[in-house]
Amino acid sequence: MNPQPTSIEIPSRQLQNGRFTDAQPAVIIESELHINVNGKHLATASLMPGMEEEFVIGYLFGQGFIKRTKDISSIRIEGSSADVTLADTAAPFPLDTNYRIVSGGGRTAFTDARLQRIESDLSLHKDVIFRGMNRLFNIATIYKETEGVHSAGIFNQNAEPVLIVEDIGRHNCLDKAIGYALLHRIPCTHHFLVSTGRMASEMVAKLCRAGFPVAATKTAVTDRGRETALACGMTLIGFVRDTGMKIHTDMTVRIIKEPLMKIYTGAERITLR
Amino acid sequence: MPPFQFDLCSRMTDNQILQSVELTRINGGCERITERIIRETALTLRVNGEIYATAMIMAGMEREFAVGHLYAQGMISGTSNITSITVNGTTVEVTLADKKATSGKPVASDLSVDRDQVFTCVKAILKSKVFAETEAVHSAGLFLNGTEIVAIAEDLGRHHALDKAIGAALLKGIDLTRTLAASTGRQPTEMIYKCRNAGIPIIATKGVPTSLAVTLAEENGITIAGLVRGTKMIVYSHPERIR
């Protein structure tokens, strides 16, 4: 999925067994992408290289700037710039933009476009959710190498992955995944999304816009994340941790002994037998 | 050095930060339970009467967040730029005498700390009661000369937590070029920009930095200590500050 290198070895000093020695740990490559829309600078994103086009489309969609891919007439990625031309060049853009300092970091342009209710009769067995989460961790290899990324995956109702992405930001992962789904016409209403990031309101809002009926994360959900999911009719699941999963808290690593998940909204979509 | 003792949320009541919700827990069996989750607040930051941004933060330390954010983003060169700060519900109104941006110059500091202090500072910010209950917050702390707690803050975002700690230090009149910052989680460029603008010479984390963050830190005289765990750490830039 990422043809260009995503990590680089950096000369460092490592403290081990009480002494400092030279080391070459691999760190994630972070690059800047300036997003220009109709010739106007909208935002500068910080992301891991790869899937820039998907990222830009997913970002514009997730923030409410476009409703469908057809709203974009051209998109050109060159170096550290993404130039987007909207189909309707006469439209005053961006409409009603305000700035948000999101909890994932950065100051981002945002519109208050209304979220729609998700219509889907998708129903999933709890084991499908666990399988999705386990597969995410098996496939997300950059995480294992550097411990410096988040990951997100789109899965079908048999927990088969359609796409798995990794990025330095939990928001970036969703933007890339949603951009991919839009470009490849993946019907999100028949799929579910698995993430490693905390589900704060903006994360859930992006997923609602894309139409995912079920979203699951390894970690926590905030009150506004939960309320957004409730308002959109989305099933929001947190703390999905199967037996054997390693959880890094403070200085120690905890190994999960009994499978756990917490369903915050829309529990009727999850079956137990 | 003895471990730090610090009540992270002494100024907040739990219910301002946490909200009880009902949920379905599947854990062996399946049951409806009530549990507290973290509250998000949409804090509107107004500068000289105009909306600067809306920040999605965890409630608490709003004044510190506003001051720290403006300083760490290079919008002000110190608290002397600020004529007034008023916190009113979920709005913070800041009046600036003038917008004197910080220079963006490399950090000038001869601070150096003992390796044991790095471990102690990183451990100190991990003793969060809110994290223990919700697993949903990041923490950041500032330590004068790496030995004395100046401020510890928590938030949904690690950027916000650092902004809050920086704001608290500024309001106390602390010289940030004498401080070590400890932060949970990964360190991308934006965190290093904050250190540069605030003049913080050392940042330590149990997580890892990105490539661009290391380059930026190297250019700006900032020491990054990452993967600070147990008795191990990796110093990615300016190792001369850690003995």
Image: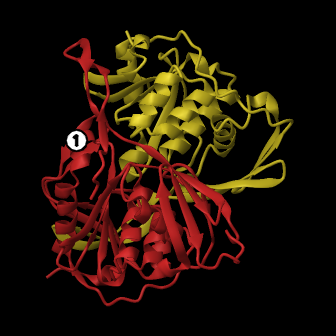
Chain colours: A red, B yellow
In the displayed structure, does residue B72 sit left or right of residue A68?
right
Asked whether residue B3 appears in the rendered view, the answer is no
Q: Position of residue A33 (x, y in %)?
A: 50, 51
Please give the residue where the numbered disc 1 appears in the rendered image.
A145
Image quarter (top left, top right, bottom left or bottom right) of the N terminus of chain A: bottom left
Residue B157: x, y in percent?
49, 48
Relative vertical location of residue A216 with respect to residue B112 in this rendering, above or below: below
Nearest to the observer: residue B16 or residue B230: B230
> Please, what is the three-letter code of the amino acid marked with disc 1?
Glu
Expressed as whole percent of the image width and height from the top left, the position of residue B87 reads: 74, 49
What residue appears at the point 69 percent right and 72 percent down from the top-left corner?
A95
Chain ID at mark 1: A
Q: How many marks?
A: 1
Q: Residues within 10 Å of mark 1 (few under 14, many from 20)?
A: some
Q: Is residue A113 visible?
A: yes
Q: Quadrant of the C terminus of chain A?
A: bottom left
Residue A55 appears in which quarter of the rendering?
A: bottom left
Image position of B193 with respect to A55: above or below: above
